Image: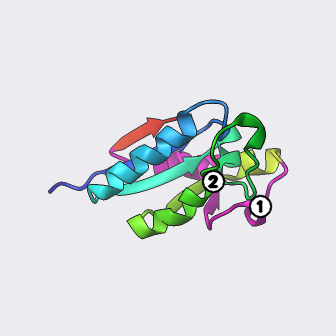
Amino acid sequence: MTIKKFMMVNRKAPYGTVYALESLEVVLIAAAFEQDVSLAFLDDGVYQLKKGHQTKGVEMKAFEKTYGALEDYDVTKLYVDQESLAGRGLTADDLCVPVEIMSRADLGKRMEEQDVLLSF
């Protein structure tokens, strides 16, 4: 089997659209087929990793705990854009899982290394 490098690029807030949830589903599918999977979080996508999602008002089930289960699927490469995080007043301590925080330039270089790049 050929292993490909997949990166899901998450740019949208966690609720209000299906993008964040769809990204997680694609990650789990790719991981199930033993592909090299990573996730990048930029712009409002950093809110997907924020601790303490409150979804009562949007009538959606919170899925932040799913990020904690990614390690069980050997998905451990989670990258966060430093500028996006700082621009939203967040730090690594505000996030629900360990991530690698990197500059936008370094994140761009990491994206260039991928075989498949999917934006959500």
Q: Residue type at mark 2?
A: Val
Question: How crowded is the residue under tag 2: few (<14 C-alpha within 10 Å), some, or many (20+)?
Answer: many
Residue 101 as seen in the image, left or right of residue 53: left
Where is 47 relative to 68, above or below?
above
Residue 80 lies, in percent from the top left, at: 63, 53
Residue plotted at (50% across, 65% down) = 69
The amino acid type, in three-letter code, at marker 1 is Asp
- Asked if residue 4 is positioned above or below residue 15 in the image, the reply reads below
Magenta segment range?
Answer: 89-115
Q: How would you rate the neighbour count of disc 1 (Cα within 10 Å): few for under 14, some for 14-19, many for 20 or more?
A: some
Read off the residue under disc 1: 94
Q: Residue at x 35, y 42 (%)?
A: 116
Q: Is residue 75 left or right of residue 108?
A: left
Q: Is residue 39 above or below residue 97?
A: above
Q: Is residue 7 among what the camera can see?
A: no
Reply yes or no: does residue 107 show up in magenta: yes
Towards the viewer: 85 or 18: 18
Q: Residue furthest top?
A: 17
SS type, badge 1 = helix
Q: Which residue is mark 2?
A: 80
Q: Is residue 83 above or below residue 31?
A: above
Residue occupying the far right of the picture: 89
Magenta segment: does it hold 101?
Answer: yes
